[in-house]
């Protein structure tokens, strides 16, 4: 929306724990109130309060939308009231009945995957790979994803850099490098290549590293956890984007999976596993894996077993649509293109199977390279078979619980982190609104800081 963004050129950044406003040319828009819309009162340069007035508050924990006013202070939601709240040094955003909802959480992304060809991505020079990740991160935040969980590639240092305001992007929850066996989903060597599979593991652009056998898996888990991984990611089935592992091949053996679960649990966290088939899911559920990624080929008994074990599934349907439509043009190798249909067709049916089994589903997308711009389409795809409220929960409350941030993220409630979106329309009446964020999401606030604010 060129020309309509109020704060596009005005960045509110958190630096060294203090909030600092740097204004380039956006403040005339603010002080003169030329938005003809929701920004009606300016704030002082050093103010850390924002007041949303006349909001229609929607979150997945509310039975009905609530009309009210929300005060944000020092990065947190401080107050939520039916009457206007006193806040002397505030930025006031009069929403005039528009929706105020929690920031979105995508629980399966790869922010360092700037190329769809993951072998080429792993071989990018580090400086190139870092800089190519920056627009991916900013794009996610622009679309309203204030927190994302990275399932392979992003190091803890990147999460720290974003926390320090060095670049615009979602709050990052990371696993470091994903782990697979030789010939598994992160072994990107062509079939005829016999060189060392470990050579790319340290590269910024590598999504994973190879570790074989219980001892190596344990060591790899410990190394990732020592370096700041919030959880562990393993590959438990073949995958689309790797060349030599058919989808139905099992990834790690049961004892290797169990070793990873023990290491994660010893570090008070959990394992997320890439998988599609019921055989792989059952092996992982038995071993204690908590987060089940993709799950396209799950059957009803397996879904029931996963639900009974308190697992969370993270379907990622949009990536298969993007790979099918855009993969050949965006550099996806022919070996991968041949595998897409094995999992794509079953995707929507898997949502119904998991819902009927009572298996919680978090929101995920798993996009690569040029596909990232289609992240929000996942809302429209799920909307074909799931109720809007459940989809909203998947990207807010269910996701927050999976991240161990229940009550802190994913809700509009006092004490929660002020990750908030202003939406033009009611996502509970039409979830596909969230699939067109450039049009429907007017404001993105992250940690009490306005990242994007568009006039209407
Ligand atoms: Zn993935």
Image (cartoon, helix red, strand yellow):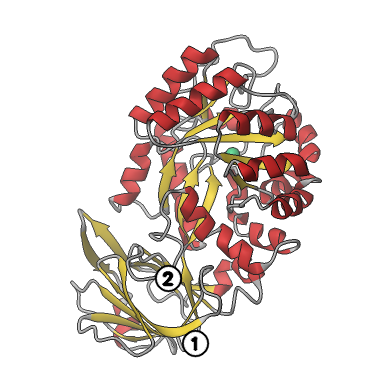
**Residue at mark 2 to residue at mark 1: CA–CA distance:** 16 Å
- Report whether residue 329 is seen: no
Along the line of sight, the residue nearer the viewer: 138 or 252 = 252
Disc 2 to disc 1: CB gap under 8 Å? no
Residue 434 location in percent, x, y?
59, 67
| Mark 1 crowd level (few <14, some 14–19, many ≥20, 10 Å Cα) | some
Residue 335 higher or lower than 397, as above or below:
above
Residue 379 location in percent, x, y?
64, 61
Residue 135 higher or lower than 78, as above or below:
above
Residue 420 location in percent, x, y?
42, 69
Q: Residue lying farthest top?
A: 194
In the image, what residue occupies the spot 70% across and 44% down?
A: 304
| Residue hosting label 1 | 97
- Report whether residue 341 is seen: yes
Secondary structure under the numbered disc 1 in the rendered image:
loop
In the image, what residue occupies the spot 56% across and 67% down?
A: 437
Q: Quadrant of residue 219?
A: top left
Q: Is residue 96 left or right of residue 180?
A: left
Residue 405 location in percent, x, y?
41, 53
Q: Which of marks 1 and 2 precedes in the sequence?
A: 1
Along the line of sight, the residue nearer the viewer: 319 or 304 = 304
Residue 397 higher or lower than 117, as above or below:
below
In the image, what residue occupies the spot 40% across and 61% down?
A: 407
Secondary structure under the numbered disc 2 in the rendered image:
loop
Q: Quadrant of residue 80?
A: bottom left
The quarter of the image that holds ligand 1 is top right
Along the line of sight, the residue nearer the viewer: 113 or 293 = 293
| Residue hosting label 2 | 412
């Amino acid at each position: 929306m060129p020309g309509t963004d109020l704060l596009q050129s005005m960045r509110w950044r958190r630096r060294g724990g203090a909030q600092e406003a740097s204004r380039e040319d956006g403040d005339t828009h603010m002080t003169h109130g030329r938005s003809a819309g929701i920004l009606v009162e300016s704030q002082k340069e050093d103010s850390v309060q924002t007041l949303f007035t006349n909001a229609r508050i929607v979150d997945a924990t509310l039975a009905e939308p609530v009309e009210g006013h929300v005060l944000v202070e020092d990065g947190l939601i401080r107050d939520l009231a039916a009457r206007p709240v006193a806040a002397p040094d505030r930025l006031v955003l009069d929403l005039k009945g528009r929706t105020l909802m929690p920031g979105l959480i995508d629980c399966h992304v790869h922010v360092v995957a700037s190329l769809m060809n993951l072998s080429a991505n792993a071989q990018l020079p580090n400086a190139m790979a870092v800089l190519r990740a920056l627009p991916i991160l900013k794009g996610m935040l622009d679309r309203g994803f204030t927190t994302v969980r990275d399932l392979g590639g992003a190091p803890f240092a990147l999460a720290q850099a974003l926390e320090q305001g060095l670049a615009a992007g979602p709050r990052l929850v990371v696993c470091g490098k994903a782990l697979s066996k030789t010939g598994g989903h992160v072994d990107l060597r062509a079939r005829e290549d016999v060189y060392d599979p470990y050579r790319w593991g340290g590269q910024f652009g590598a999504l994973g590293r190879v570790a074989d056998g219980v001892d190596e898996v344990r060591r790899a888990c410990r190394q990732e956890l020592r370096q700041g991984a919030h959880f562990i990611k393993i590959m438990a089935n073949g995958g689309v984007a790797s060349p030599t592992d058919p989808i139905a091949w099992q990834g790690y053996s049961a004892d290797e999976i169990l070793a990873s679960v023990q290491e994660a649990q010893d570090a008070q966290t959990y394992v997320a596993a890439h998988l599609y088939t019921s055989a792989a899911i059952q092996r992982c559920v038995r071993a204690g894996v908590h987060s089940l990624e993709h799950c396209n080929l799950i059957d009803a008994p397996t879904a029931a077993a996963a639900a009974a074990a308190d697992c969370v599934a993270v379907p990622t349907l949009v990536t298969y649509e993007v790979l099918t439509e855009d993969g050949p043009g965006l550099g996806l190798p022919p070996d991968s293109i041949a595998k897409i249909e094995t999992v794509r067709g079953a995707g929507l049916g898997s949502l119904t199977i998991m819902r009927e089994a009572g298996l919680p589903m978090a929101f995920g997308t798993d996009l690569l390279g040029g596909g990232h711009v289609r992240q929000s389409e996942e809302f429209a795809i799920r909307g074909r078979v799931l109720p809007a409220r459940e989809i909203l929960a998947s990207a807010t409350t269910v996701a927050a619980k999976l991240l161990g941030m229940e009550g802190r993220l994913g809700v509009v409630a006092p004490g929660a982190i002020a990750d908030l979106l202003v939406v033009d329309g009611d996502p509970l009446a039409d979830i596909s609104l969230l699939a067109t964020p450039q049009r429907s999401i007017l404001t993105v606030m992250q940690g009490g800081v306005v990242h994007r604010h568009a006039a209407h």
